[in-house]
Amino acid sequence: MEKMSRISPKASRRVSRAPVYFYSILLVYCAAWVFVSFSQNSLLQSWELFFSRGLGVGAFDESNKPARLVRGAIVALVRHEERYVESLIDRNARVERFLYDGGERMDVVLFHDAYFSAALRARVQAATPRLPLVFVNVSSEFELFESAVNPDCPPSPLSESAPPGYKVMCAFWFSGFRRHLPRSYGWMLRVDDDCLLQERFAWALPMPPRVHLAAPEWVSLDGSPDSIADPPLWLYEPERMGSVVRGLRNLTLRFAVAHRVVSDALYPHAPNATRVWPAPYTNVFYLNLDWLRSTPMVTDFMAAVEASKCVYSNRWGDLPLWGSVAALAGGPRHRFLLRYWHGSHHIMANRDPHREADHAHTTILNATVVVSLDANETRRD
């Protein structure tokens, strides 16, 4: 009879405990992953990160991973007239409902001038008591206005009709805001006082570091006064085409040459000079402030625009100016899906993401993912 192999009781206990050790280590690892991941991301994003890594599917990857905990601000430049105050109160209530995180990563900052009195500030705060508001007086920006005339960006009938306050607003939202935000803020999300959110903001703030600037809309305003088209096009409709961006393209291209900026997004060799630089619809606009401060090309361009006085001479707007920054920076243009009512233009932004006619200049988007748009996808024909 063959001898039966026997396992000693000690060895048996070692074998039986092996799965226990294995599963214990696995449990500790999973618990650590969950703690780290969920502390940096939202619940939904953490699960999507898990499935994209573990299963190799989904839209998330390491480049889309939300940034470390960086504090920022939801910002607006507010007006003291009654109709704007009522709109601001509605806007704040929607910010609290759809966007505010309880103060963990963000402050809500309202820039105002001297006419926005203490009584108005108290009234606005009382309307949303659970939404702490930070009021910042930027009257000094309005004192910078001057009736400048620059032959490189001469006035037009349309630019002459714009009041000084409007031109100051354009200058403020392109570069002046930097003087009134502390360096501790790594990002900002502009939501104007007449922009009423219709749905929850679906992306964790701050956005990933690779997202330098983003907006719900990128527009190519062919034939409009804000169109950043080549000068030859002005011959066809001189009263409209580029009437409030006179000289902007030339200044931008001269700046690119002087600073050795190479970017296909500038369309320097476009046939018949008909390409238009897409620009973010800046009434709701995300900006990576850390990127801005660390990118001399952008800050130098801001300084060049300020020195030209063209915002005052020809009413250059912040929309085409940020379009010029995007063209200089090159790379992808980022857009996030968000429905909101824009009171000044009387439109619903992203009113129907499934209708191609509403976004002829861009692509259909995923509601939870910031997407990169190729330069050719954002042109409206």
Image: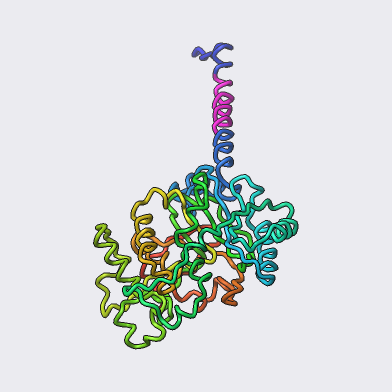
Q: Can you give x and y, in whole percent of width and height, for residue 297 in the image?
A: 33, 55
Name the residue at 59% across, 61% down. 113
Image location of residue 329, percent across then percent down: 35, 59
Which quarter of the figure has residue 24? top right
Residue 326 seen by the camera = no
Q: Nearer the viewer, residue 174 or 341?
A: 174
* Front position in the image: 281 or 76: 76
Asked where in the image residue 303 lies, by quadrant, the reply is bottom left
Q: Which SS type dominates the magenta stretch?
A: helix
Q: Residue at x 24, y 72 (%)?
A: 269
Q: Is residue 142 visible?
A: yes
Q: Quadrant of residue 120?
A: bottom right
Say if the magenta span includes residue 21.
yes
Residue 171 position, x and y percent, is 46, 64
Specify the quadrant that holds the C terminus. bottom left
- Give, as a single range, the part of the protein colored magenta: 15-29
Q: Could you tell whether 138 is left or right of 210 in the image?
A: right
| Residue situated in front as seen by the camera: 47 or 266 | 266
User: Residue 155: x percent and y percent?
Assistant: 39, 78
Residue 195 is inside the magenta segment: no
